Amino acid sequence: MITRAPGPLLVVGVGLCALAFSTAHPMIMAAVLVVAVALLLASRTPARGVLLIAGILGVGVAVLNPFVQASGDLILFQLPEIPIFDMQVTLEEVMAGLTLGARAAAVTIVVMAVLALADPDRLLQLASRLAPRSALAASVAARMVPTLRRDAVALVETSRLRGRSPRVGSWVARGRTASTLALPLVGSALERSLDVAEAMAARGYGVGTPTRRPRVAWDAVDRFTMAVGVGMCLVAFASIAGWLGRYGFFPTMDPLIDVRSLVAAVGTVLAGIVLAGAIRR
Amino acid sequence: MIAAALTDVRFTHTGRQRPALDGVSLQVRAGEILLVEGPSGSGKSTLLRAIAGLAPHFTGGRFEGTVHVFGADTRRAGTAELARDVGLVFQDPETQAVRTGVSADVAFGPENLGVAAGAIGPRVERALRDARATHLADRVVTTLSGGERQRAALAAVLAGEPRILLLDEPTSQLDGAAVAALDGILRDQAARGVAVVITEHHAHRLSTIADRIVRLERGRLVDRVDDAVPLPVRVAARGRVAVEVRHVSARFADRPVLRRCTVTLTEGTVTALHGDNGAGKSTLLRAVMGLHPIEDGAIVVDGRDVTRMATEARVPTLGFLPQDAGRRLIHERVADELVDAVRGVGALELDRRLRQVVEDLDLGALLGRHPLDLSVGERERVALGAVLMADPRVILLDEPTRGMDAAHRATLVAAIRRRSADGAAVLVATHDPQFALAIADEHIRIREGVIVDETVAVAG
């Protein structure tokens, strides 16, 4: 598990998200998506779940978009009429949908990658300057998530050791087995939260005004992350200011390749991959 | 100098009739190591909570008498204020961590106590060093083993620089080497003038460092009696081969944890599996049960290769009590828990088994209770009862004595021996050498995933 200073990662996250929302250029969107996946994989945390959710979200948006937009010159096919929906599918609608889907997936992956990479304790230390009690509650909740997950796994194992598996049988049987485990899981969570509250009280929580240990200094990778993040923010700013040119899908798609966008996309991908490599090392 | 003084302390938990502490008067001096022994439910944990002020401030309940900590009356001083002087390491180190990283968690106490920002780092380093946990500083709490968690929890408490250090069952998850290390840590603390109070079921594991040992029974201090398990070593009676573990290798994440392990379990034989924390004991048992994937080798039960068989299909021939089984109870009544694993058995047979298990494990008084209301040792017995109810021919037990007092360990030994005499093959992973000697016919040792020694213990 890799954990890094949260500040520079937040800047990278903001830069990538701003870039994703600043333009509809498919090439830049693809670049953001590639960097997001590279950062997620660099965290060495299980990525399959995040990629699955982001993929479902992206594909869902891409598939739905042609039926809710009614533009574009190049008609691909015409489906039987259904009220409300536009059943005439054009190339421009499909490309716009794919770009929107890529944006949704990229932003989801960026957020999850930043959360996976950022040291949760330092992240909450940052948050605690704004809302100390909420940050502590979030900290405890974050700590309890892996414990809860382990409890859930343990209860499923208990069930299997008694000859029942929540993964075998009809959906109804699986649901019934899983539901019998929900109550003990809640009970276990409540018990553990009481234990943590007691441990906090025993360690002086609430005795007076707490202090904070000094922030850990950034190392070379953190400084490089910050530099890449600032660079991505600048590219996003350039895009918002229109220096990369506007991209449109309708009525006919703009050319996919132009020099400025190509430079921005390649630069983003290279910087992101080098950053992911540096973090992973 | 008196660090803590309890005078006629009587404490009853909310909703209970019987007091958890019943007229306890006790003094603990600075620099003294006091060991409090006693059976499950005798009030040991409550005694520590009373000194820390958690009883009654956190737990609620009816409190009489007085507890003074360095002169401060715990009824008037809040728990958080007492935390300046008192540090408590709870029985379950898993739930004590508030933060994700070890060093951040160790800093939590000093931060709460308002230690100057610049002094927190050195305190954290010192506490980690004192707890022999410096190597854990950059680790994430959830990735630590049981023994490592115990050290991290101890470091988190030491960072508050308490003048009274309370430890609730600190050796329950530790191997012999870790207990020896803890021994050194506690001696160091006492030498610095810290009063150390330890509660233990297995008093023998720390009795050599104690300046004084007191015994608590049913909430009262009583005269000490030797309650060591008086059981002879058995003579091995080799029967038919029940389980063969053949050259099994397995990994945990990227690390090999089992390396070509070969173990044979025979009917009517109890085998003790020894090994340090992290040696691969639990993984071996879980692999036999099909709960941990194996890379290489085979598991053969009654001559049949079950390597690719699902766990569900291995029961009830195989029965497994995992580590920390008391946290894995499903039902709201102990009686329901016990019968949960039994399939395809008539009412008469079910009743016979239930009576047998209840008698064997002394569960009669617990049948109508909610598992969450039970002590750690009681929950372990219930979980074991649920395993035995299925009448498995092969019984795998992973640290089954956690939280159990001497009397109930003897009960457990008798119950397992009875199953063994009936022909069951038993494999018990344990850190407790006395328990292993009492229960096992054969002893095998695993070190860094390799079975290094296999010998048959023979009674004289």
Image (spheres, coloured by chain):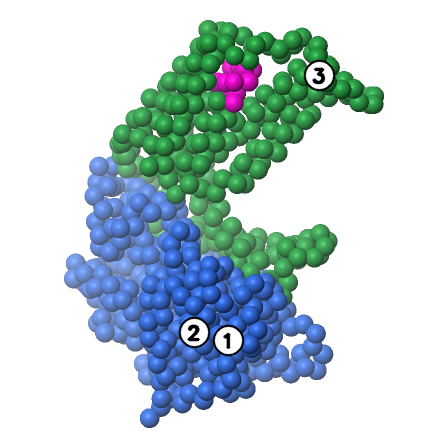
Q: Which residues are magenta?
A: A19-30
Query: Which residue is under mark 3?
Result: A90
Q: 10 Å neighbourhood of mark 3: few (<14), some, or many (≥20)?
A: many
- In the current view of this chain or complex, which residue is farthest to the left? B191
Q: Which of the numbered marks, if any, corresponds to residue B243?
A: 1
Q: Residue B131: percent from the left, percent from the top?
A: 25, 56
Q: Amino acid at mark 2?
A: Val
User: Circle 1 — which element?
Assistant: strand
Read off the chain for label 1.
B
Residue B381 visible? The answer is no
Looking at the image, residue B352 lies above or below residue B212: below
The residue that appears at 63% across and 59% down in the rendered structure is A165
Q: Are marks 3 and 1 on the same chain?
A: no
| Rendered colour, chain A | green
Q: Chain coloured blue: which letter?
A: B
- Whether residues under marks 2 and 1 lie with C-beta atoms below 8 angstroms apart, the answer is yes
User: Circle 3 — which element?
Assistant: strand
| Residue B201 located left or right of residue B374 | left
Query: Which residue is under mark 2?
Result: B263
Looking at the image, residue B407 lies above or below residue A233: below
N-term-proximal mark, 2 vs 1: 1
Q: Amino acid at mark 3?
A: Thr
Foreground: A229 or B290? B290
Q: Residue A173: percent from the left, percent from the top?
A: 71, 56
Q: Are marks 2 and 1 on the same chain?
A: yes
Q: Which of the numbered marks, if any, corresponds to residue B435?
A: none
Residue B228 visible? The answer is yes
User: Circle 2 — which element?
Assistant: strand
Q: Amino acid at mark 1?
A: Val
| Residue B207 located left or right of residue B363 | left
